[in-house]
Image: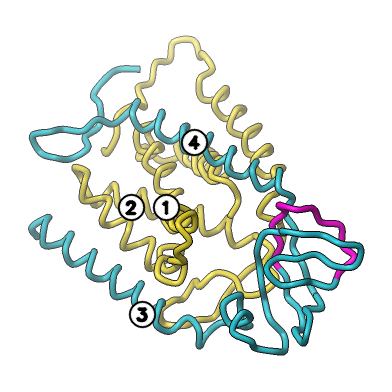
Chain colours: A yellow, B cyan
Amino acid sequence: MPDWLAHVLFAYVLCSVLGMKFKTFTKANTALVMAGALIPDLVKVKLGFDLLGIDVRPFLEPFHTPIGSLLSAALIALLFTEGLVVFSLFVLGFITHLALDLLLVSVSGGMLLLFPVSWAEYQLGLIHSDNYVVALLLLALAVLVYIFQNRKLPGRRVNRSRGVP
Amino acid sequence: MNRFVLCSILVACLLVLSTYHYLNHDRHEAYPENEEVINGVEGTVSVSGTVVDRSDEAFTLRLTIISLVPVASGDKVEVLGVLGDELIPEEMIISTKWSHHAIYLRSLLGLALVLIVFVKYWTFDRRSLRFVPKRKRE
């Protein structure tokens, strides 16, 4: 996986850009997309079990697939008002996650994008998982976007904080 | 649909999905992995782990890899290679111990960022037992 900072910043930059065109991407909803960008990594619960010497990877791996993330997103969206909108934002979030992870290098295998229909594994093999340049570039981009969004324009006052239209 | 019923259905679906993967993943792996290697397969395998020892000609995960690639104890290594008495690598991905730790550090920053942004715009309503957006002006 690229680190969570890269995932979260990628979601933030994407929502900020989309927010210029679509009113749905308020700051509150951007927060949901950013949270959704971490949903596939619920699989990382396995790290806790690894410390106990228990290998739960084969059981938790489906969380890092589109269908597993979809079900997880739906489950978490039940904790929100306007669940359907929140669910859609989570879906966008986890799609950004899987898209970034697709870029990673792996010596064998890859991501089970069509599981459980197919066990074919996909990977583009462009970046290493410990590559910090991606996070650094996204951080620079996020700072630029943040500055652009918060620049003061004369005679203009916009409230973009509210979530769920 | 009742929230509890929907929640039960989704949890059940996730359990079925996970169980299906758990029971069938061995048959669909491109190459035998750590567990099968320990159980004694031969041929092309894919193993990964943390380097525990290093000599002039080889390094050790839990099995010895014949390679001159510079690695240090604590590095994370993924190896695709041919296993006979020893494993001769064809492809390798190495993460140094510190770059691997840096991933966790950056991930903690990412998690903190999400939590801060989330708490800023959302709050938990105890009456409805749901998260609701905070209605405040910027």
Residue at 38% of width from left, 55% of height from top?
A91
Residue A16, which numbered label?
Answer: 4
Span shown in magenta = B67-78
Three-letter amino acid code of the residue under disc 1: Leu
> SS at mark 2?
helix
Q: Which residue is mark 1?
A: A92
Q: Quadrant of residue B92?
A: bottom right
Q: Which residue is mark 2?
A: A88
Dots 1, 4 in contact, CB < 8 A: no
Dots 1, 2 in contact, CB < 8 A: yes
Three-letter amino acid code of the residue under disc 2: Ser
Instruction: Measure the alpha-carbon separation of dots 1 and 4.
Output: 13 Å
Does residue B56 lie above or below B123 as drawn?
Answer: below
Label 2: chain letter = A
Q: Which residue is mark 3?
A: B20
Residue nearer the viewer, B51 or A25: B51
Instruction: Measure the alpha-carbon separation of dots 3 and 2.
Output: 26 Å
Three-letter amino acid code of the residue under disc 4: Ser
Instruction: Measure the alpha-carbon separation of dots 4 and 2.
Output: 16 Å
Q: How many marks?
A: 4
Label 4: chain letter = A
